[in-house]
Image (cartoon, grey):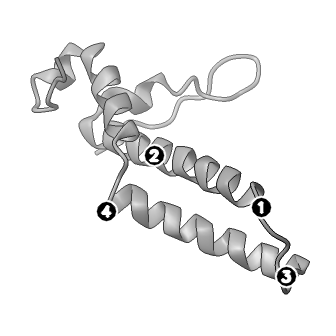
Amino acid sequence: MTSPVQITGQTGIASGLDRAASKENLKKAGQQFEAVFTGMMLKSMRAAKLADPLFDSQALDTFRDMSDQKVVQQMAEHTPLGIGKAMTDFLARSQPDLNQTGVPRVE
């Protein structure tokens, strides 16, 4: 069972530090970071056009962006680059209670 979200501060937004308190949440954060990083990389590659496309429209761009987002999510879950795991391992080092529950440490 998860703890309720606490709203704190002047903005009314939780600080988010409690989200890293469990092994599952830390793994999800690593996957999300991997997806964002891979998405930015794919978007940069698409921006470096080497030739003008034969058919170009706003609809094609929108469809390609949606397709890329789905591919990026699948890559982060099934064939990650490793940047998300590196971030997860780094964050796990600062939380000794997670290290005892089986999150491997990278030395």
Q: Tell me how far mark 3 sits from mark 4, CA to CA.
A: 29 Å
Is tag 4's residue or tag 1's residue first in the polypeptide sequence?
1
Q: Amino acid at mark 4?
A: His
- Residue 57 lies, with reference to residue 45, above or below; the image says below
Q: Are marks 2 and 1 in contact (CB under 8 Å)?
A: no
Nearer to us: label 3 or label 1:
1
- Taking the image as shown, residue 104 lies to the left or right of residue 73, namely left
What residue did someone put label 1 on?
49
- Residue 79 lies, with reference to residue 64, above or below; the image says above
Q: Residue 30: in sight, yes or no? A: yes
Is tag 3's residue or tag 1's residue first in the polypeptide sequence?
1
What residue did someone put label 4 on?
78
Q: Amino acid at mark 3?
A: Ala
Query: Residue 34 — which label?
Result: 2
Is tag 2's residue or tag 1's residue first in the polypeptide sequence?
2
Q: Residue 2: in sight, yes or no? A: no
Taking the spot 76% from the left edge, 24% from the top edge, the residue there is 11
Taking the spot 61% from the left edge, 56% from the top edge, the residue there is 42
Q: Tell me the crowding category of disc 4: few under 14, some 14 to 19, or many 20 or more residues within 10 angstroms, Cα based.
A: few
- Residue 85 lies, with reference to residue 20, above or below; the image says below
Taking the spot 10% from the left edge, 32% from the top edge, the residue there is 102
The kind of secondary structure element at disc 1 is loop
Front-most of 61 and 74? 61
Q: Amino acid at mark 1?
A: Lys
- Taking the image as shown, residue 50 lies to the left or right of residue 69, namely right
What residue did someone put label 3 on?
59
Q: Amino acid at mark 2?
A: Glu
Q: Tell me how far mark 3 sits from mark 1, CA to CA.
A: 18 Å
The kind of secondary structure element at disc 3 is helix
Is tag 2's residue or tag 4's residue first in the polypeptide sequence?
2
